[in-house]
Amino acid sequence: MNPLVNGINQPAITNTETARSSISPGEAQSNFANSLKAAIEHVNDTQVASNTKTQEMAKGEVDDLHNVMITAQKASVTLETSVQIQRKVIDAYKEIMRMQI
């Protein structure tokens, strides 16, 4: 199984982790924070790569327009995906807050 799925690092599951039935809230929070940080860094890296290629193209240092456009499109899709995920998370949070106990 590929440890990198859609730019988000998946934690490797070992035999000791499968033996445990639960993890502590602190560990869960840490794992979530690390995953979120890695995803945001991936989005930032694609944006920086796109900006760099575009600047190089404007300066005349790159003759291959195709690679510049592909990099820009990857950055656009990555950013749009993260915005859509953000919206879904906010909608889920609002739905949970509307629930009655």
Image (spheres, rainbow, N blue to C red):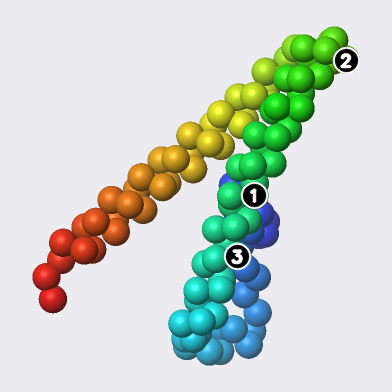
Residue corresponding to mark 1: 41
Q: Which corner quadrant holds the C terminus?
A: bottom left
Q: Which corner quadrant holds the N terminus?
A: bottom right
In this picture, residue 40 sits left or right of residue 96: right
Q: Secondary structure at mark 2?
A: loop
Q: Residue at x 55, y 58 (%)?
A: 36
Residue 67 visible somewhere in the drawing: no
Name the image quarter holding residue 69. top right
Marks 2 and 1 sit apart, C-alpha to C-alpha, by: 27 Å
Name the image quarter holding residue 49. top right
Residue corresponding to mark 2: 61
In this picture, residue 46 sits left or right of residue 52: left
Q: Secondary structure at mark 1?
A: helix
Is disc 1 in contact with disc 3, using a CB cutoff of under 8 Å? no
> Disc 2 residue type?
Glu
Marks 3 and 2 sit apart, C-alpha to C-alpha, by: 37 Å
Image location of residue 27, percent across then percent down: 54, 80
> Disc 3 residue type?
Asn
Residues packed near mark 2 inside 10 Å, few (<14), some (14 to 19) or many (20 plus): few
* Residue closest to the eye, 41 or 17: 41
Which of pointers 2 and 1 lies earlier in the amino acid sequence? 1
Q: Secondary structure at mark 3?
A: helix
Image location of residue 71, percent across then percent down: 69, 26
Residues packed near mark 3 inside 10 Å, few (<14), some (14 to 19) or many (20 plus): some
Residue corresponding to mark 3: 34
Residues packed near mark 1 inside 10 Å, few (<14), some (14 to 19) or many (20 plus): some
